[in-house]
Amino acid sequence: MSKERTFSIIKPDGVSRNLIGKIIARFESEGLFVIGAKMKQLSRHEAEGFYAVHRSRPFYAELVNSMCSGPVLLMVLEGENAILKNREIMGATNPTEAKENTIRKLFGVSIGENTVHGSDAPDTAKNEIAWFFAESDLANKQ
Ligand code: ADP
Ligand code: MG
């Protein structure tokens, strides 16, 4: 076990349905600490850059539109095995395939509007955090 940081987004479909509190409560109850947070309306440039890895996928334009459709909550979560733990709490990309009691199963609307983003590996976590947060924005939990 090791303490890690991961990057989380509550997507516009989650923010607009007032799910911020429920989602953060779930992270906290599973031992993840919010060490950075900001509400933001993403620009197209930010959403396109953030999801650049998916640029050639058929759903890219829809994904960028949906991420810019309203404010998001950007967060850095810290805890033991935070990256994998967050992915487990989120559930599979497609809410219909997500396990019971995961955030996407409970709240996801569709494969595109699936309520939360979470980093999938240590290198992506580091890059995604750096895309939106300076080290000085983050509370040091140690
Ligand atoms: P995850 O968010 O689980 O890591 P991916 O990295 O594969 O999933 O995809 C990024 C985001 O793109 C997904 O969370 C979802 O919002 C959107 N997406 C993925 N696949 C599709 C699809 N087939 N149709 C529409 N949107 C999709
Ligand atoms: Mg992904």
Image (spheres, rainbow, N blue to C red):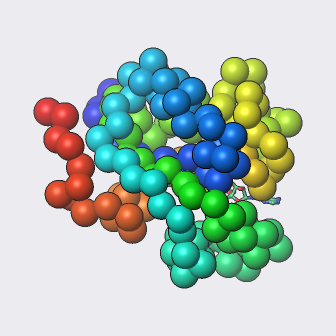
Residue 27, position in %: x, y? Answer: 47, 28
36 displayed left or right of 67: left
Residue at x-position 32% and y-position 61%:
133
Residue at x-position 48% and y-position 61%:
40
Q: Quadrant of residue 28?
A: top left
For the image shown, how many numbered marks are present on the structure? 0
Residue 54 appears anywhere in the view: yes
Instruction: Determine whether 133 is above or below 82 in the image.
Output: below
Q: Nearer the viewer, residue 89 or 134?
A: 134
Instruction: Determine whether 29 is above or below 9 in the image.
Output: above
Q: Nearer the viewer, residue 137 or 128?
A: 137
142 displayed left or right of 38: left
Residue at x-position 55% and y-position 75%:
43
Q: Nearer the viewer, residue 28 or 59?
A: 28
Quarter in which the N terminus is drawn: top left
Residue at x-position 66% and y-position 47%:
16
Residue 54, position in %: x, y? Answer: 67, 71
